[in-house]
Amino acid sequence: MSWIVEPFAVDFMQRALLGGAMVAAICAVVGTWVVIRGMAFLGEAIGHGMLPGVALATVLGAPPLAGAAASAIAMSAAIGALQRRGRLSFDSTIGLLFVGMLSLGVIIVSHSRSFATDATTMLFGDVLAIRGPELATIAIALVVTLTVTTVGHRAFVAAAFDARVAHVLGLRPLRAQVALVGLVTLAVVASYQAVGSLLVVGLLLAPAIAAGPWTRRIPVRMAVGAALAMLAVVAGLLVSWHAGTAAGASIAASSIAIAVASGLARAVWDRAASRDASHASRPSPAASASS
């Protein structure tokens, strides 16, 4: 067991574990709604939409997280503004802004002399460099996420399955949509330090997908997804420590592996259950003989 315990005896690994666990909980909760609503493209777009803010903050010597938050908020606001005009579809709006923000980020960061290092951190994160202030920020993001999802649960559910019914019930589906986009933005920004803008979508989607085949209720799916996401954090950090791989990429890869394993396990389970049911429905030899 020393190969599990020993890495987490180091201070920076403890901070990475704590920060990664909180990010895992945020991504599992928000990711459940992302999967249910089919909003994976939105998460990826906002993740790349952070690049101009992060790049500009890097060039100016400002905190990258502040730049990421400002850029992601601007991206979300632009999506909402274009959607309200109603001239473009949701996917088209996101696609245009996605490419525009990504191009702007590359243009800005290309003027930085530390382009290679900065770009690597932006895309893949640096969970091993999490410190006290970042932990406090992630903790606040977790509290906000849990509060909003709890308060808005009924509205989110109604808007996800029938926006007209939600409107009739006075649940204001448009506000629910705006709140959900805000949660995705918050999750992406909070996860930036841990896994970067490129890998955050994996942490948003994989745990919720892994929990899906085994759960029926949304809160249970969130809880199971959070547990699986935290398992991915632990596995990714251990792989990074012992194999010398990038920590953020190892966490994202572990979450994908867990999702694949969950899908395969459910397929085997269903096949075995179907086989048992078919055997149970057949008459026994004794019953056939007596008839």
Image: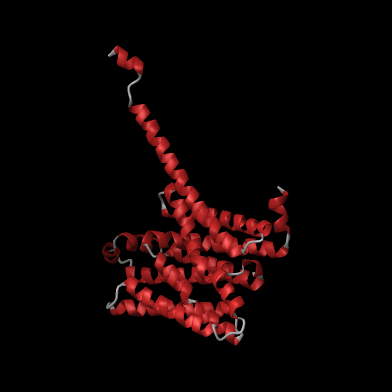
Q: Tell me which corner region of the image, top left, top right, bottom left or bottom right, holds residue 249.
A: bottom right
Q: Name the one closer to the observer, 167 or 103.
A: 103
Any part of residue 220 in sight = no
Question: Residue at 54% across / 79% down in the picture?
Answer: 54
Query: According to the image, what is the colour scheme of the structure?
Result: secondary structure
| Residue depicted at 71% across the width and 53% down the height | 5
How many numbered discs?
0
At x 58% / y 67%, what residue is drawn? Answer: 194
Q: Please state, as top left, top right, bottom left or bottom right, where the C terminus lies in the image.
A: top left
Tell me: 5 left or right of 219. Answer: right
- Observer able to see residue 122: yes
In the drawing, does residue 6 fall left or right of residue 73? right
* Position of residue 240 measured from the top left corner of the image (x, y, whole percent): 64, 60
**Front one among 78 and 253:** 253
Q: Is residue 45 left or right of residue 282?
A: right
Task: Point out residue 172 in the picture as x, y percentages from the top left corner.
Answer: 32, 69
Residue at screen point 30% across, 73% down: 89
| Residue 198: percent from left, percent from top | 51, 69
Residue 143 % position (x, y): 53, 66
Q: Is residue 216 above or below residue 143?
A: above
